Amino acid sequence: MRTLHFFKQAFLVVFIVGFTHFSFAQGKDLPNVVILATGGTIAGTAEGADQAGYTAGQLGVTTMIESVPGIQELANLKGEQISNVGSQDMSIDIWLTLADRINTLLASNEVDGIVITHGTDTQEETAYFLNLVVKSDKPVVTTGAMRPATAISAEGPLNLYNAVAVAASPKSIGKGVMVVMNDQIHSAHDATKISTTAVQSFMSPVEGQIGGVIYGNIEYYRSPYSIHTTKSEFSVEGVMELPRVDIMYAYADMPADFIAYSIKAGAKGIVIAGVGNGNMNAATLEAVKKATGQGIVVVRSTRLPSGDVLRNAEVNDDEYGTVVSDELNPAKARVLLMLTLLKERNIEEIQEIFFNY
Ligand code: ASP
């Protein structure tokens, strides 16, 4: 994996040299926005006009931009293809490539904002990862679509239009990474996918959306509460891989031996997608205690869609050596834990990080 990432970085260096001067197509007196395409259903196509048998990640970034009427009036646009995958295949390698590219682009005076087109399945993980490692106050927006580009009433073009409007707006500066879907603006910290098929597929169940965008008209209701981007202590500069962190889904009569397997496979951290308030059965708790005794960091999150996981409530975290995820769902808790484990820290520090990020 390390070698693969090295080659990707080497490719990117060559790629970047070709873009030292950004030639934005129209050159009008508009903000300059770069669209980084990664794939997903927004770039998906099918034989018919429904979702049957469609393949994500088929259209290139230029075709996507050209399919949105009026988008060129919002910003000077430039597209780059970072990957073209269904986001079920999103990887840490692509995350590291994206983070490097975004940090390089946003360091330039010629770039005012970034839009990332992305599949919806893991969009919240990518957005949250970038929220922690992008080093700029300029707007960074992810978007996608539930309907392939060839489907009846495909919503991708309007989502892309709105995402560009948000990325181009001075109102969006300092808001961290945002997810723009179906006229809503979510903070990367809060957004989660809630439907397998509906166009209304994202929500922020604990804190609520931070704004709305209707045909490019933006209204913010609040700023995100958690630490992000320029205030974040996390950086992936020079990082080639992240420590392995596994997620374990809790359920009635859950076997405890997954924990030992995970550690044997090389996990440095484990997130429990717990029942209720981050809970698990007695056998798993004992296995967790053994794991934390060996220096493995175990974070208690929840399989429920909403609510904080509370420290030392029903589970005594002090006794088991565990950390609570606070509001983070298991997938995002894993992202934060992987970054946290890049440096040696004690459990109290890690807990503080989970309360603040
Ligand atoms: N599997 C697709 C993806 O995440 C689904 C989508 O984009 O809506 O790429």
Image (cartoon, rainbow, N blue to C red):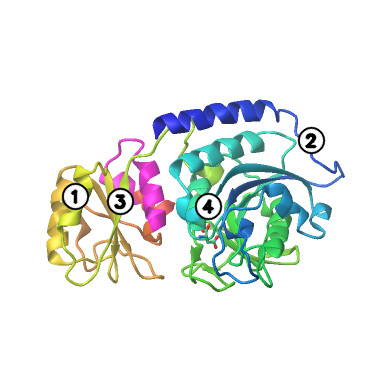
Mark 2–mark 4 contact, CB under 8 Å? no
The label nearer to you, 4 versus 3, is 3
Task: Name the disc covering residue 261, or none.
Answer: 1
The amino acid type of the residue labelled 1 equals Tyr
Within 8 Å of ligand 1, the CB of disc 4? no
In three-dimensional space, the C-alpha distance between marks 3 and 2, rounded to whole angstroms, equals 42 Å
Residue that mark 3 sits on: 246
Would residue 169 be seen by someone viewing this image from the given angle? Answer: no
Q: Earlier in the sequence, mark 2 or mark 4?
A: 2
Where residue 69 appears, x then y in whole percent? 81, 60
Q: Earlier in the sequence, mark 3 or mark 2?
A: 2
Residue that mark 4 sits on: 127
Q: In this view of the protein, which residue sits in the foreground, 1 or 96?
A: 1
Where residue 62 appears, x then y in whole percent? 73, 48
Q: Which residues are magenta?
A: 331-351
Q: In this view of the protein, which residue sits in the foreground, 56 or 187?
A: 56
**Among all residues in the image, which is located at the extreme front?**
47
